Image: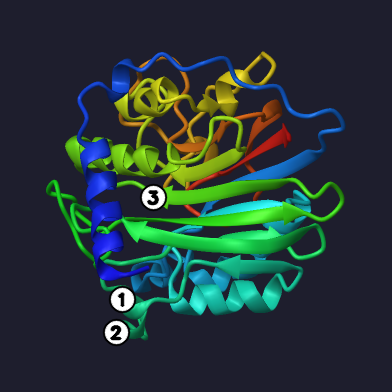
Amino acid sequence: MNPFTRRRLLQGFAAAAALPTLARVVPAATPAPPPGGRKHTVLTCNIRVALPEDDASGNGWKARRQLCMDVIRAQQPDLVGLQEVLREQMEDLERGLPEFGSFGFAGPEMDARRDGYHGIAKNPLLYSRKRYDFVSAGGFWLSETPHLPGSLSWESARARHVNWLRLRERATGREFRFLNTHLDHQGQRAREEQMKLILAEAAVYAPEFPQIFTGDFNARASNPVVKLALDAGWTSTYFAAPEPRDEGFTGHAFLGPAYQPKSAASGPKAIDHILTRGPVTTQSWRIIRDSREGRYPSDHYFVAAEVIL
């Protein structure tokens, strides 16, 4: 892509993200999956960045990395969206889960940060090597300069990004897109603008092209951040799943069921989400509360959805 074309493309994303009418879009009915659609198990997993203070409390990465991988593998997932991943964690996951291909960790921002946490953690994606063929992939930063690694806008507390994969299911030849992100943990405006940028880029694809979107949105289902996605034609697997629905929290500060959320508001409390767009239907949604000897794989519960496409 020549510099002029790339510049126009980035300007287009930014302009679309700024449109005030995005939240007022009335989406068309979700296309039905093609005959013979197959089940895909999707996870979103905030694995908690490796921090020295967690080592001191007994919740460090080395103490929970095997549990983290065991919990992921036990779900028999096809697709996994990870958040808060540092280099040592990525290397452990690639060694411990060789049945998955991965994308989304490497980049100049991580080349400059070989060790430790410097305010940037990555959101790599895992996909079943046995089930899917890699078609293409990409990503961009959630800022007004999305081509610049580590860039920030809208008073975001951290540099945030989105990664995506385009995969082809070997058994059917069907292609789909898998996106993964982690929105800002402090600023509501930052979260909304970051989501708008993702939605504008995803809207380049035809409505009938299947897309799956995982992430820690740092926002409950009632938050305007989620409404932006729903109004742009995305479906929440939480709301699409059969009732009764689990309204529990997903962030738990390593306390499990003893955790007391800051807000006692009613309704779903999960901040980790799985969305779909296009001919994709939801069969199930659940919070994974697995632990071992009182230890949890992360300070977030992982979330799973089974979808048909």
Q: CA distance from mark 3 to mark 2?
A: 21 Å
Q: What residue does disc 1 label?
A: 109
Q: Residue at x 75, y 46 (%)?
A: 174
Residue found at the far left of this picture:
155
> Residue beneath label 3, please?
182
In percent of width and height, residue 77 lies at 73, 51
Q: Residues within 10 Å of mark 2 (few under 14, many from 20)?
A: few
> How crowded is the residue under tag 1: few (<14 C-alpha within 10 Å), some, or many (20+)?
some
Q: Amino acid at mark 1?
A: Glu
> Three-letter amino acid code at disc 3?
His
Tag of residue 112: 2
Dot placed on the residue nearer the N-terminal end, 1 or 3: 1
Coloring basis for residues: rainbow
The amino acid sitting under disc 2 is Ala
Q: Which element is circle 3 on?
A: strand
Tell me the mark number nearer the camera, choosing from 1 and 3: 1
Q: Is residue 20 visible?
A: yes
Pointer 1 with pointer 2, Cβ within 8 A = yes
242 on left or right of 146: right
Spatial distance from mark 1 to mark 2, Cα to Cα?
5 Å
- Residue 253 location, x and y as percent? 42, 48
Residue at (49% x, 47% y) in the render: 300
Residue at horizontal 18%, vertical 52%? 144
> Where is 126 relative to 209, above or below?
below
CB-based contact (under 8 Å), mark 3 and mark 2: no
Quarter occupied by the N terminus: bottom left
